Image (cartoon, grey):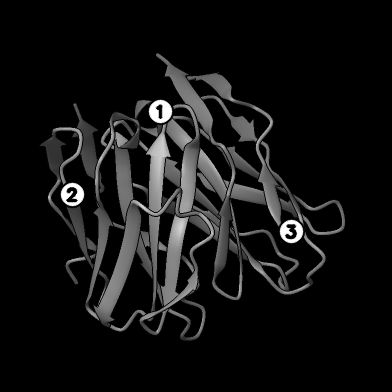
Amino acid sequence: DAGVIQSPRHEVTEMGQEVTLRCKPISGHNSLFWYRQTMMRGLELLIYFNNNVPIDDSGMPEDRFSAKMPNASFSTLKIQPSEPRDSAVYFCASSGNLGTLYEQYFGPGTRLTVT
Amino acid sequence: AQTVTQSQPEMSVQEAETVTLSCTYDTSESDYYLFWYKQPPSRQMILVIRQEAYKQQNATENRFSVNFQKAAKSFSLKISDSQLGDAAMYFCAYNRRGQFYFGTGTSLTVIP
């Protein structure tokens, strides 16, 4: 299994531009999570999906952030317009709830820099 | 609300020695899962060990073991025979029905 795949690995953009981060979860997993990690705030849960449906988006900072999961194998996190304070590492993770597979598997992360 | 607390922002250990990282959590549930994740400088989050709350036996994975005290809501990680490659940020995490909560992490330095 290739694990959780995220793209791009690095993104540098200018303030005001739209940014789209992509994630492919592990096949068979039905829960997907988006996290943001910064030195100041640590690891923050932004949103999570179960069976492609958003369950908890209370961590989404503001309306500039949106996430979609059109099917079981793909999700996007979009920031429009981006701001310098959005600079962080964004992680996608997936989890299954079959048997004892309750741990999350993380992707390698996308390092976003907004100038 | 469930919260996870790691009270040690930084820890250090001499190579080959043993170190224990602390974690406490708050929950009113009886059925849940606990995890320790490692994040080395590469920033990849790696699962180290997991514990099912209904199991009284402490989980062990090679040099890594936990001390799970359910009544005290404590879940510490012990690393034996520490190696330079153990240097990383360690996160404690709680999962109940798909809801995950992470602690703020403990940065572990291994001194040669």
**Numbered disc 1: secondary structure:** loop
Q: Which residue position holds label 2?
A: A19
Q: Nearer the viewer, mark 2 or mark 3?
A: 2
Residue type at the position of mark 3: Ala
Question: In the rendering, which numbered label is found on residue B1?
Answer: 3
Q: Looking at the image, is A78 positioned above or below residue B42? A: below
Q: Position of residue A62 (x, y in %)?
A: 43, 50
The answer to which image quadrant residue B86 occupies is top left
Q: Is residue A40 visible in the rendered structure shown here?
A: yes
Q: Nearer the viewer, mark 1 or mark 2?
A: 2
Residue type at the position of mark 2: Val
Residues marked 3 and 1 touching at CB (< 8 Å) = no
The answer to which image quadrant residue B60 occupies is bottom right
Q: Looking at the image, is B18 positioned above or below residue B77? A: above
**Numbered disc 2: secondary structure:** strand
Q: Looking at the image, is A66 positioned above or below residue B24? A: below
**Which residue occupies 71% across, 68% down?**
B53
Residues packed near mark 1 inside 10 Å, few (<14), some (14 to 19) or many (20 plus) = many
Residue type at the position of mark 1: Ala
Q: Chain letter of disc 1?
A: B
Q: Is residue B62 visible in the rendered structure shown here?
A: no
Q: Chain letter of disc 2?
A: A
Taking depth in this image into account, of B33 and A8 the one nearest to the observer is A8
Q: Which residue position holds label 1?
A: B87
Report the side of B2 relative to B95 (left or right): right
Taking depth in this image into account, of B14 and A90 the one nearest to the observer is A90
Spatial CA distance of label 2 from label 3 is 32 Å
